[in-house]
């Protein structure tokens, strides 16, 4: 997986919850409570569902069906043969509700009853992050509703006291700031941190969906917290299916003065304007053709020995622009750390310890947001 692909996947894992693909339903499969999301596609109706007690998605794939009948096949386990997967057969009533049958390969049947979710009837959630999810992504909200956070210790970073919060089922934990910032700044920062914590829990369940065979472990390290920036690494090791597990950092870099999550382009200027759309081709071109060569030139001046490429196949070529196009980054006491991102076979070269732009360099090439001490 190249640097941008891993950057995009980590961003998706950290901020999971895309636009809803269909209508959300509540109901039962047999005696078990379920939540489903169904959408009409070109091949018929498909979607996903989860049992409320497990919270893991099971994909539903459209199948050929008679007129007026919705047929779908479960795809929870990609190892299983298609003929072994349970099938759904549903009919839609005039009230928008579905009734039908679940049937497995051995002939066992269970009744299904689904009714459209009345999103407006969901009560407001006391947690602002979950309440925002309730309004925007009710399917994901219902997955997380009922989960609670527990205190998981505290620590002091200079004038700033942090309290850790953990979701017990997933083990995902993140801190909140309880002292050090003025009340308004603390509220801004904690709102974002709470959203990131719940996004991590959501990513955990999405990763383990599809048979529950995945792995999702996360470690958070606070690197710098002051009046200008709160910076921490969120390092995730994950296997969500496919050929190989992977890992990477999706850091938190917050401006406590505004509560905004900072982009690398906000804090460092190469002297050429950077596109604002991080999904467009212009931004990809900027990162590969402008940013990466600029950073390589800085590091060659600062760390000439470390930037020399060896001759062996296993040597790390830090002079290669490509490995710096999409670095993870965070603020440290010494400066701005930027982590290289190599292809899979050279992953041991990722994130060297030395790749820090000193604050003196950051000040000379400051972006629109000043984070230098």
Image (cartoon, rainbow, N blue to C red):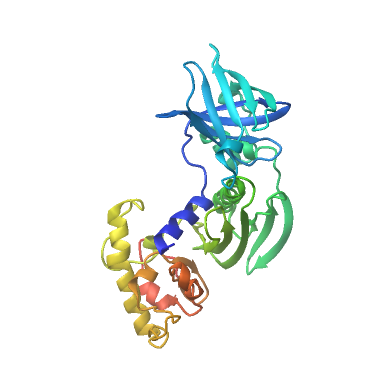
Count of marks placed on residues: 0
Q: Residue furthest bottom?
A: 305
Quarter location, residue 176:
bottom right
For the residue pair 220 and 325, the one nearer the viewer reads as: 325
Residue at figure coordinates x 63%, y 51% from the top left: 213
As drawn, the residue found furthest toward the left would be: 272
Look at 49% across and 56% down and name the residue there: 10
Relative to residue 335, is residue 37 depicted above or below?
above
Residue 34 in view of the camera: yes
Q: Indicate whether 204 appears above or below 363.
A: above
Q: Position of residue 9 (x, y in %)?
A: 47, 54
Towards the viewer: 200 or 115: 115
Nearest the camera: 214 or 228? 214
Q: Residue at x 33, y 53 (%)?
A: 276
Quarter holding the N terminus is: bottom left
| 236 lies above or below 316 | above
List x then y, in percent, for residue 174.
63, 56
């Amino acid at each position: 997986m190249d640097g941008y692909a891993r950057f995009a996947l980590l961003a998706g894992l950290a901020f999971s919850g895309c636009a809803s693909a269909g209508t959300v339903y509540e109901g039962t499969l047999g005696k078990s409570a379920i939540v489903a999301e169904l959408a009409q596609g070109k091949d018929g109706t498909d979607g996903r569902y989860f049992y409320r007690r497990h919270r893991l998605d099971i994909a539903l794939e459209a199948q050929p069906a008679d007129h007026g009948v919705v047929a779908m096949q479960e795809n929870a386990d990609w190892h299983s043969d298609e003929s072994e997967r349970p099938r759904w057969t549903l009919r839609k009533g005039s009230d928008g509700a579905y009734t039908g049958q679940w049937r497995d390969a051995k002939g066992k049947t269970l009744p299904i009853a689904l009714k459209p979710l009345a999103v407006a009837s969901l009560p407001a959630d006391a947690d602002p992050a979950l309440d925002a999810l309730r309004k925007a992504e009710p399917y994901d909200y219902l997955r997380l509703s009922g989960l609670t956070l527990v205190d998981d210790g505290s620590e002091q970073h200079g004038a700033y006291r942090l309290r850790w919060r953990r979701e017990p089922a997933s083990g995902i934990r993140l801190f909140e700031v309880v002292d050090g910032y003025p009340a308004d700044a603390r509220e801004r920062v904690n709102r974002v941190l709470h959203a990131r914590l719940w996004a991590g829990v959501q990513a955990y369940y999405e990763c383990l969906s599809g048979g529950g065979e995945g792995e999702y472990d996360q470690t958070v390290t606070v690197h710098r917290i002051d009046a200008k920036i709160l910076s921490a690494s969120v390092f995730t090791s994950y296997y969500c299916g496919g050929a190989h597990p992977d890992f990477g950092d999706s850091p938190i870099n917050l401006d406590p003065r505004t509560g905004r999550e900072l982009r690398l382009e906000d804090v460092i200027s190469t002297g050429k304007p950077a596109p604002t759309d991080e999904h467009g081709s212009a931004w990809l071109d900027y990162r590969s053709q402008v940013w990466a060569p600029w950073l390589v030139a800085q590091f060659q001046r600062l760390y000439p020995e470390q930037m020399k490429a060896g001759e062996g196949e296993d040597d790390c070529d830090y002079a290669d622009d490509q490995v710096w196009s999409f670095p993870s980054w965070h603020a440290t006491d010494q400066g701005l750390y930027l982590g290289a991102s190599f292809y899979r076979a050279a992953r041991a070269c990722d994130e060297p310890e030395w790749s820090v732009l000193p604050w003196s360099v950051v000040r000379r090439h400051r972006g629109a947001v000043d984070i230098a001490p």
